[in-house]
Amino acid sequence: QLQLVESGGGLVQPGGSLRLSCAASGFSLASYAIGWFRQAPGKEREGVSCISSVDGSTDYADSVKGRFTISRNNAKNTVYLQMNSLKPEDTAVYYCAACRIIAGTIRKPFGSWGQGTQVTVSS
């Protein structure tokens, strides 16, 4: 069972930046594609980004392309999400988990959800 812990959320003004971290404990992240997901109040959870374990290739939801960057540091057993040009509609709880692209959509193929980290974009 993958155990992942998210951190780095907070309150930021529109146009600002945040970097989220996803740390693994008890296993190596290097063997897994890891992604970021988010759930806004009253909305379904959606896949935001996914990074491959094989070649480091990345995928993004259309809503964040050009603003968010996912990366991984296998030596630190951590995956990051750099979020720039944040908008109020990016406000959500952000989660990391295993990911897979299914029919063009970022999905979580297995594992459970962690606590997540709250991102609030507001002036």
Image: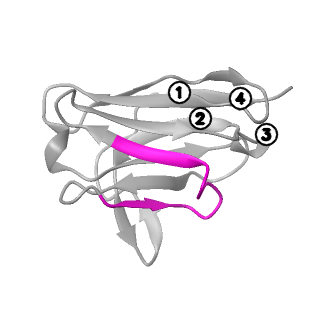
* Colouring convention used in this rendered image of the protein: one colour
Which residue appears at 47% of the width and 39% of the height? 81
**Foreground of the two, 100 or 67:** 67
The answer to which image quadrant residue 66 occupies is bottom right
Outermost bottom residue: 103
Amino acid type at image mark 2: Val
The magenta segment: 57-71
Separation of disc 4 and disc 2 at Cα? Answer: 8 Å
Separation of disc 1 and disc 3 at Cα? Answer: 16 Å
| Residue 119 placement (x, y as % from top left) | 64, 30
Which disc, if any, is residue 93? 2
Which residue appears at 58% of the width and 29% of the height? 18
Residue 51: say if magenta. no
Mark 2–mark 1 contact, CB under 8 Å?
yes
Amino acid type at image mark 4: Thr
Separation of disc 4 and disc 1 at Cα? Answer: 10 Å
| Residue 68 placement (x, y as % from top left) | 55, 47
